[in-house]
Image: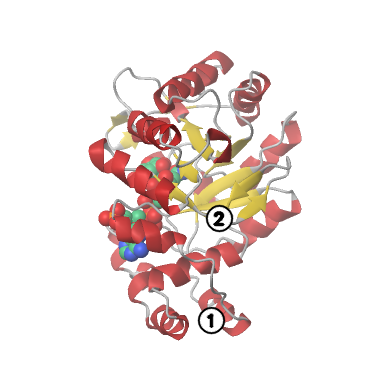
């Protein structure tokens, strides 16, 4: 069973999707196929992940073998900050992703981040002395490129990712077509409650990335108490035991029950399946409250190499 949340444009988006960062090669094709066979209908892709060809192959296999029809799918991709220099460049980047995904349109197109990066052929993250080579950008202007992608039928909806409240407001104030989502880091240690209510007041839905705390990511902060492995947390474990569910399922359930969409990534079939199997139980109010208290405000994704840029989003509180 797949459950949905309605976006401000009336489109229904599945609350559970598969994250695809690092799902490359055959592992990627197989993971996406397992997900689609399991019942996932949403996939989160990006130009940056350099694996859209694999995702396209897996989608085509699933559609051609009758596992799913294209219209049932909700495919997201993201325009990378290297393509913010013109409306034409944004459209081209979107068209490139569509060709790799073997699709006529995506269901959701996001600006991957609120900063722009210098275009350097063959280098997805150009860096000098540890700093990302960012360039100034006017987000209201960049947004026009996204609207053009809508006008041309390349996507059914547009949104943003890693935007703080001010950046989102700037886009909303200047938008002809409103952003329907903001995809941000969100999990039981970084619950984003202020940003979520700011967004809810404006009809923008939150998609959580790193919803399991991105175990395995090499972030020095992770040894910190505020980012300890949430799948080992005693409270999460005991709630899981009460429901006959895994800690990972409790963490995901907490988010979807808070109206936040999740996109856990896994290359492991059993995990792909268990991450989807979170619709047959509910956390009670006391359980929701005790997880709410685990918020530490720490981030796994701090994008330190962008801190020097005027558009770095995380200097502000939310
Ligand atoms: N907009 C943005 O800037 C960003 C977007 N994203 C998106 O969000 C997605 C998810 O983020 P990600 O960083 O991958 O973090 P996640 O929190 O989804 O964690 C993924 C990791 O958790 C492991 N895992 C998955 N399920 C389980 C489970 N049930 N039990 C134990 N371990 C599990 C996976 O291992 P294994 O694969 O070995 O099973 C993988 O190592 C990305 O794939 C991408 O699509 C991510 C970062 C930034
Ligand atoms: O989407 C993403 C996946 O993770 C990367 C970092 O590890 C991020 O840079 C990027 O935004």
Which residue is identified by label 1?
290
Q: Kindly indicate the quadrant of the structure image that contains residue 284.
A: bottom right
- Against 137, residue 244 (above or below) is below
Q: Quick one: 246 or 86, which is closer to the camera?
A: 246
Residue at screen point 56% across, 44% down: 163
Q: Kindly indicate the quadrant of the structure image that contains residue 126.
A: top left
Q: Quick one: 178 or 257, which is closer to the camera?
A: 257
Residue at screen point 38% across, 31% down: 52
Task: Report the side of 88 relative to 248 (left or right).
Answer: right
- Against 10, residue 219 (above or below) is below
Ligand 2 is found in the corner quadrant, namely: top left
Q: Can residue 275 be seen by looking at this rendering?
A: yes
Q: Nearer the viewer, mark 2 or mark 1?
A: 2
Label count reads 2
Q: Kindly indicate the quadrant of the structure image that contains residue 138.
A: top right
Task: Answer few, some or many: residues within 10 Å of disc 2's Cα (few below 14, many 20 plus, some between 14 and 19).
Answer: some
Identify the secondary structure beneath mark 1.
helix
Which residue is identified by label 2?
2
Mark 1: is the Cβ under 8 angstroms from ligand 1? no
């Amino acid at each position: 069973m797949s459950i949905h949340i309605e976006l401000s444009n009336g489109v229904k988006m599945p609350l559970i999707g598969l994250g695809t960062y690092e799902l490359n090669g055959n592992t990627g094709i197989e993971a996406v196929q397992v997900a689609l066979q399991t019942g996932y209908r949403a996939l989160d892709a990006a130009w940056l992940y350099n694996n859209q060809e694999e995702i396209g192959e897996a989608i085509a296999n699933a559609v051609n073998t009758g596992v799913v029809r294209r219209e049932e799918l909700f495919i997201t991709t993201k325009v990378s900050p290297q393509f913010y220099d013109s409306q034409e460049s944004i459209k081209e980047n979107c068209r490139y992703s569509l060709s790799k995904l073997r699709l006529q349109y995506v269901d959701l197109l996001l600006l991957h981040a609120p900063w722009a990066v210098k275009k350097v052929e063959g280098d997805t993250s150009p860096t000098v002395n540890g700093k990302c080579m960012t360039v100034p950008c006017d987000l209201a202007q960049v947004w026009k490129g996204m609207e053009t992608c809508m006008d041309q039928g390349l996507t059914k909806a547009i949104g943003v990712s890693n935007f703080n409240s001010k950046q989102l407001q700037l886009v909303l104030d200047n938008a002809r077509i409103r952003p329907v989502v903001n995809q941000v880091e969100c999990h039981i240690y970084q619950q984003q409650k202020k940003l979520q209510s700011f967004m809810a007041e404006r009809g923008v839905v939150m998609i959580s990335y790193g919803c399991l705390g991105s175990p395995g990511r090499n972030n020095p902060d992770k040894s910190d108490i505020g980012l300890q492995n949430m799948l080992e947390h005693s409270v999460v474990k005991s709630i899981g035991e009460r429901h006959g569910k895994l800690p990972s399922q409790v963490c995901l359930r907490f988010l979807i029950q808070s109206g936040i969409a999740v996109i856990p990534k896994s290359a492991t079939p059993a995990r792909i399946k268990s991450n989807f199997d979170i619709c047959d139980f509910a956390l009670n109010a006391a359980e929701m409250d005790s997880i709410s208290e685990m918020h530490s405000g720490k981030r796994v994704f701090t994008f330190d190499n962008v801190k020097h840029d005027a558009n770095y989003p995380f200097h502000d509180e939310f």
